[in-house]
């Protein structure tokens, strides 16, 4: 087929479609880009400057969460104590909740979706229940002061009792 035989309307249509694909493609690459495990939210490997930035972001998110949700719940046991940041489980779960919130409320999404409902049903409420039960916050909340949730990891030592048990 020669150039003279090409339909200019079809070429224009193809050109418009190509522009559309070129516009969408960078966002798709960003969404599906392969990342190392942990990403920018894996506290254990963050350089100090990134950790400081993440602490600031997390603090803002927790302040927002408290004002928007926690102070409005009928059950005060869901409130976070002022020392929430000293509880490793709370930090990890609240970080995950913040990341899920960002993904659900991503303004680049062109279409309406169920992501907002999913965030509430699959992230917010289960996380709040988990924090209430597992993060060791109740002792601090009830006393208005920080209590260490535990003394830290116990080093494992092979003892005669252990050897007899596993034998």
Image: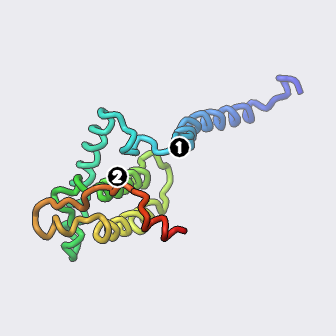
Horizontal arrangement in the rendering, residue 48 relative to residue 20 (left or right):
left
Residue 77 appears at what percent x and percent y? Answer: 21, 72
* 10 Å crowding of disc 2: few (<14), some (14-19), many (20+): many
Residue 60 appears at what percent x and percent y? Answer: 24, 48
Q: Is residue 126 above or below residue 105?
A: below
Q: Which quadrant does the C terminus fall into?
A: bottom right
Dividing the picture into quarters, in which one does residue 93 lie? bottom left
Residue furthest to the front: 160
Residue that mark 1 sits on:
31
Horizontal arrangement in the rendering, residue 134 relative to residue 123 (left or right):
left
Q: Residue at x 24, y 62 (%)?
A: 149
Q: Which mark is residue 95?
A: 2
The residue lying toward the viewer, choosing from 13 and 140, is 140
The residue lying toward the viewer, choosing from 152 and 123, is 152
The residue lying toward the viewer, choosing from 109 and 83, is 83
Q: Is residue 167 above or below residue 9?
A: below
Residue 17 appears at what percent x and percent y? Answer: 65, 38
Q: Residue at x 39, y 56 (%)?
A: 156
Q: Which quadrant does the N terminus fall into?
A: top right
Residues under numbered marks 1 and 2 in contact, where contact means CB atoms less than 8 Å apart? no
Q: Residue at x 53, y 40 (%)?
A: 35
């Amino acid at each position: 087929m020669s150039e003279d035989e090409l339909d200019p309307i079809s070429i224009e249509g193809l050109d418009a479609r190509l522009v559309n694909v070129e516009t969408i493609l960078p966002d798709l690459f960003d969404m599906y880009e392969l990342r190392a495990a942990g990403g920018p939210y894996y506290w254990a490997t963050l350089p100090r400057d990134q950790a400081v930035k993440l602490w600031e972001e997390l603090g803002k998110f927790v302040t927002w969460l408290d004002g928007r949700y926690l102070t409005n719940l009928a059950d005060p046991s869901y409130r976070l104590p002022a020392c929430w940041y000293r509880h490793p489980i709370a930090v990890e779960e609240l970080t995950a909740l913040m990341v899920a919130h960002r993904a659900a409320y991503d303004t680049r999404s062109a279409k309406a979706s169920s992501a907002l409902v999913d965030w509430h049903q699959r992230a917010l409420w289960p996380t709040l229940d988990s924090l209430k039960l597992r993060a060791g916050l109740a002792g601090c909340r009830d006393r208005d002061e920080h209590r260490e949730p535990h003394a830290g990891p116990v080093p494992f030592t092979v003892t005669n009792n252990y050897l007899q048990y596993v034998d």
